[in-house]
Amino acid sequence: MAPKVLVSRRRLLGIGAVGAGSLLLGGCDDSVSENPKLLDFIDKAAAFTYRAQRLILPRGALAPEYSEMDVAAVFRPNGSTSPSDPAYRALARGNFADWRLKVDGLVERPMQLSLADLRALPARTQITRHDCVEGWSCIGKWTGTPLSEVLNRAGVKPQAKFVLFHCADKFSQAGVPDAFDPNQSDTVDGGGVNYYESIDFVDAYHPQTLLAYGLNGQALPVTYGAPLRLRLGRQLGYKQAKYVMRIELVDSFRRFGAGRGGYWEDQGYEWYAGI
Ligand SMILES: Nc1nc2c(c(=O)[nH]1)N[C@H]1C(S)=C(S)[C@@H](COP(=O)(O)O)O[C@H]1N2
Ligand SMILES: [Mo]
């Protein structure tokens, strides 16, 4: 992909003083990751904007919710839409009956939850807008259990600082097929590292932070991250981890990937992608 122009996304702050904090990569482009100086610059700016946003936004502020009429006829897919991992594809063939969400790391009670277990927890449905860093938005109706329900059952240890999501796919820029066929093996996401993401506890316990298993009244399709994906109300698209297989409570994300807390963060995107 050709390098793209850095674009401003700091509508919320709207101040030039943020400077470097206003720089963000346009689209999904990893050219910046080859430039350590720029990465360092972005890191410092990101820490600044994170603190600024945490200061001006009340902890519990809700993202706007919309009405049924606003729901897009077809939700726009992006990123991985068809994981190539054989174990994942086998689970998909079995309609995820054998899938288990692992919850471990800094918890009192490590657990494995089936989809039925998750569906039995208190549920929430919300119509929210997804904003991708590439500049498009899409409104969808999401159903799932608040992440807090799972965290409270597992018992978060006091040392935990972040919730880290391990995904089944390895994202690649090679392009995506139109439809997921679990019987076909493809190389769409083959190669690199697994997608992952992380959030702090302000977002983890936010009422609109869901482990979503439903989209627009249907079981979450593979294209959109089946069987379970993260939905945050107040951060950009790349934070909304699809194909979540394991939730790990950690005190630091330095030992994962390139140490920046997520797949796109490792390519230079901000860790706190507030909208
Ligand atoms: N596991 C995983 N999660 C992911 C991605 C991905 O490639 N793999 N892409 C991210 C990006 S950039 C966006 S915009 C959204 C797209 O979600 P959608 O396919 O439901 O639109 O998923 C995010 N979560
Ligand atoms: Mo995105």
Image: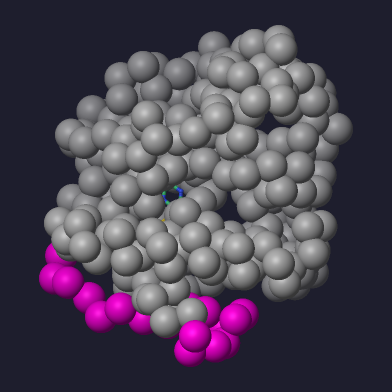
Q: Is residue 134 left or right of residue 104?
A: left
Q: Residue at the right extreme?
A: 122
Q: Tell me if residue 85 comes above or below residue 189 in the rendering.
A: above
Q: Quadrant of the C terminus?
A: bottom right
Q: Tell me if residue 104 comes above or below residue 235 in the rendering.
A: above
**Which one is nearer the viewer's eye here, 210 or 20?**
20
User: Residue drawn at (67%, 62%), measured in percent from left and top?
Assistant: 54
Q: Is residue 11 left or right of residue 108?
A: left
Q: Which residues are magenta?
A: 1-17
Q: Residue 81, position in %: x, y?
A: 38, 45
Q: Can I make out residue 210 in this image?
A: no
The answer to which quarter of the image holds residue 84 is top left
The answer to which quarter of the image holds residue 228 is top right
Q: Tell me if residue 178 comes above or below residue 6 in the rendering.
A: above
Main secondary structure of the magenta stretch: loop
Q: Is residue 11 magenta?
A: yes
**Which one is nearer the viewer's eye here, 61 or 117?**
61
User: Residue drawn at (23%, 28%), measured in percent from left and top?
Assistant: 185
Q: Residue 48, position in %: x, y?
A: 52, 66
User: Residue drawn at (30%, 19%), measured in percent from left and top?
Assistant: 86
Q: Residue 261, position in %: x, y?
A: 43, 43
Q: Residue 196, position in %: x, y?
A: 42, 38
The count of marks equals 0
Q: Can I make out residue 190 in this image?
A: yes
